Image (spheres, rainbow, N blue to C red):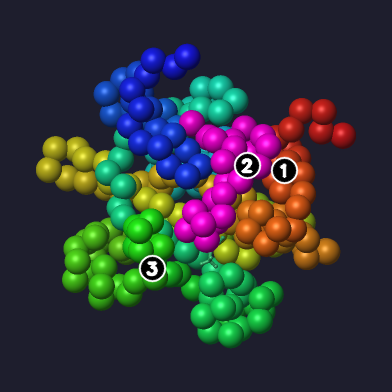
């Protein structure tokens, strides 16, 4: 039994106090939720795969100069990360129309967008994470103008990198969600990438068949969600017995 102090339990992860000040242990659960937790279930082995995929993606992003909270993976389901003050926004990057964008604007899923779109949602489960404008973000001071600029420029760089990384394994990156946090150094703070990047928060379609390899399999009752997550990990070269 774990004796560490639990700080927070979310829908897909639990956060525990880390071994040193300023660190956190991020535990990846198999639980899956959709439609603001109205639909609940389990994807067998998801936590193990997301821990591994997120470790891989964050490590590669740090190599291109994106500052992240990731320190190291501890075991199958846990990673050590830097403690941040989470900015209460979800940053959604879209290359191709899908999901809520298609529903809201009546644009057919799969239509390539004329250019990459960045959207912001206010992180509030009770409100269902509503989409918010830059004016609203400034008005309610959820983050500063400089932080917005840092987040959007990192989001574009992350998107460029991930599009290439996934296309090399025949996966099309349709859209994805990022979260950022602040770390403080005296009176100064800077923004770093936090949370996770995994098939839970990305839409990933096979380039050749269009098959969905992400959480839409769970959201839309398509079945085969564990296999889809494993397929992403396998193509990234993260599974043993990779033949
Ligand atoms: O539902 P929507 O089309 O707005 O989702 C856009 C992208 O953001 C999808 O890849 C989805 O998985 C991700 N997302 C998320 N968490 C949310 C909302 C969206 O990971 N709360």
Horizontal and vertical percent position of residue 226:
72, 43
Q: Which residue corresponds to the image point at 28% horizontal and 29% vertical from the top-left?
A: 22
Magenta range is 27-50
Mark found first going from the N terminus, 3 or 1: 3
Horizontal and vertical percent position of residue 208:
83, 64
| Residue under pointer 1 | 226
Which of the 4 image quadrants contains residue 186?
A: top left
Q: Residues within 10 Å of mark 2 (few under 14, many from 20)?
A: some
Horizontal and vertical percent position of residue 134:
30, 73
| Residue under pointer 3 | 130
Q: Which mark is residue 114?
A: none
Q: Residues within 10 Å of mark 1 (few under 14, many from 20)?
A: many
Q: CA distance from mark 1 to mark 2?
A: 9 Å
Which of the 4 image quadrants contains residue 230?
A: top right
Q: Is residue 62 above or below residue 77?
A: below
Horizontal and vertical percent position of residue 14:
44, 34
Instruction: Residue lying at the far bottom in this picture: please name it.
Output: 106
Q: CA distance from mark 3 to mark 1?
A: 29 Å
Q: Is residue 67 left or right of residue 222?
A: left
Mark found first going from the N terminus, 2 or 3: 2
Element type at mark 3: loop
Element type at mark 1: helix
Instruction: Residue lying at the far right in this picture: please name it.
Output: 243
The one of 180 and 90 positioned closer to us in this rendering: 90
């Amino acid at each position: 039994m774990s004796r560490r102090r639990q700080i927070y339990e979310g829908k897909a992860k639990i956060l525990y106090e880390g071994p040193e000040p300023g660190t956190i242990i991020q535990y990846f659960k198999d639980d899956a939720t959709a439609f603001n937790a109205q639909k609940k279930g389990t994807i067998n082995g998801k936590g193990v795969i997301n821990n591994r995929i997120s470790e891989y993606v964050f490590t590669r992003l740090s190599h291109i100069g994106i500052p992240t909270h990731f320190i190291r993976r501890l075991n199958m389901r846990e990673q050590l990360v830097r403690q941040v003050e989470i900015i209460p926004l979800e940053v959604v990057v879209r290359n191709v129309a899908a999901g809520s964008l298609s529903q809201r604007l009546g644009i057919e899923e799969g239509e390539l967008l004329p250019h990459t779109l960045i959207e912001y949602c206010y992180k509030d489960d009770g409100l269902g994470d509503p989409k918010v404008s830059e004016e609203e973000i400034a008005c309610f001071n959820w983050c500063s103008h400089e932080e917005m600029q840092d987040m959007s420029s990192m989001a574009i760089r992350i998107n460029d990198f991930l599009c290439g990384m996934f296309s090399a394994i025949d996966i099309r990156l349709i859209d994805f969600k990022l979260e950022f946090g602040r770390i403080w150094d005296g009176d100064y703070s800077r923004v770093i990438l936090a949370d996770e990047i995994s098939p839970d928060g990305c839409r990933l379609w096979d380039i050749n068949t269009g098959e969905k390899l992400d959480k839409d399999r769970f959201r839309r009752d398509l079945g085969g969600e564990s296999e889809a997550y494993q397929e992403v990990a396998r193509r990234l070269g993260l599974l043993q017995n990779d033949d």
